[in-house]
Image: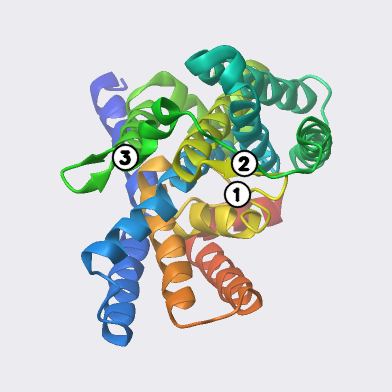
Amino acid sequence: MINNNNTKGSMNKMFSERIFTSTRIPLLVVVVVICIFQMVNPTFLSYQGIVTLVYAMSYFLIVACGLTFVVMMGSFDFSGISIMKLSALICVLYIENFGLWVIPIALLVCAAIGFINGILVAKLSVPSFMATLGISIVVDGIALLTSKGFLHLMNDEGFRSISTTFIAGIPSVFYWSIAIWLLCTGLAVLTPFGRRTYAIGANSRAAALSGINIDRQRILVFTLSGTLAGAAGVFYMSQLGGGSVEIGGQMMIPLFASVVAGGTSLRGGSGGPQNTLLGVIIITWIQSGLRMLGTGLDTQMVVLGIIAIAMSIATTDRNKLMRSIVK
């Protein structure tokens, strides 16, 4: 006779190991990155240096959390940066018309775009990379049309204060981003939503046989990703106070690199937003350190690409890979 309590305990143990087993390598990399850049440039961890790093990583962390859920599920979302851009432009273009109500309007628009991504993937069986890449092009076109290609500046002090108010010496955008990260971590680790997402990424066929509604879960995950990308756009505009269609032009590679560097496997079923914080620290701090050293953007992209490949190799589930080859 099977002991249900023992079985349940074993499943919980496996689930915990799957979530946290990939944390050690990113944590080690964070320590190494900090030590190297602090030795090369003693101002790296000065107060002004920390504030600069916090500004660089905060809105980036929010959009990365959304992408992490998609990657956990074994899918891709190439529309996050475009959605973030559109959200930021909606805020700067219509703040005078709607006041702070422009924030929920921007979030609803972005959630709708994420929902469309989910419908394309789940109901129309379009591969996620193709669906989201196509949507990103459409969204970029809408952003260009609405902005007419010009630089737009934000003058609303109330909106700007959302990100730029200093609390205990740290800008408020940092606290917003950490709060969103904590919510995403709780959603992934403590709720059925998170367990379903992990299950689909680990083995979608087994997840379907266990009663999980795969299509609905995929739609929800892509909608969440679009919403968080929209939130990142709101904080981006609040933080920087201006932007154009060039927003986030070089962010796609660092964004995926941060998710992978955090230990979330591109094959799905492992990692999670709890690890993405470490990945974002690795990528944004390496970028900032390279800028301090006067390194060009081309060299930065090469370094980040190498890091993404190396971390992909390090976080690949070899047993899962072998099973897929055997099949």
Q: Marks 2 and 1: CB-CB under 8 Å?
A: yes
Relative image position of residue 148 (x, y in whole percent): 81, 37
Real-space Cα separation, disc 2 to disc 3, in angstroms: 19 Å
Which element is circle 2 on? loop
Q: State the mark number for residue 74.
A: 2
Real-space Cα separation, disc 2 to disc 1, in angstroms: 5 Å
**Residue positioned most to the front:** 155
> With 241 as the anchor, is 292 left or right in this view?
left
Q: Marks 2 and 3: CB-CB under 8 Å?
A: no
What amino acid is at disc 1?
A: Arg
Residue topped by disc 1? 267
Relative image position of residue 210 (x, y in whole percent): 54, 19
Instruction: Residue 239: name its quadrant.
Output: top left
Q: Crowding at label 3, few (<14), some or many (≥20) Cα neighbours within 10 Å?
A: few
What amino acid is at disc 3?
A: Ser
N-terminal of the pair, mark 2 or mark 3, is: 3
Q: Crowding at label 2, few (<14), some or many (≥20) Cα neighbours within 10 Å?
A: many
**Residue positioned most to the bottom:** 40
> With 219 as the anchor, is 254 left or right in this view?
left
Report the colour scheme: rainbow
- The N terminus lies in quadrant: top left
**Residue positioned most to the left:** 168
> With 33 as the anchor, is 196 left or right in this view?
right
Relative image position of residue 187 (x, y in whole percent): 38, 26
- Between residue 27 and residue 212, name the one nearer to us: 27
Residue topped by disc 3? 16
Q: Crowding at label 1, few (<14), some or many (≥20) Cα neighbours within 10 Å?
A: many
N-terminal of the pair, mark 2 or mark 1, is: 2
Which element is circle 3 on? helix
Relative image position of residue 193 (x, y in whole percent): 46, 21
Whether 324 is drawn above or below 309: the answer is above
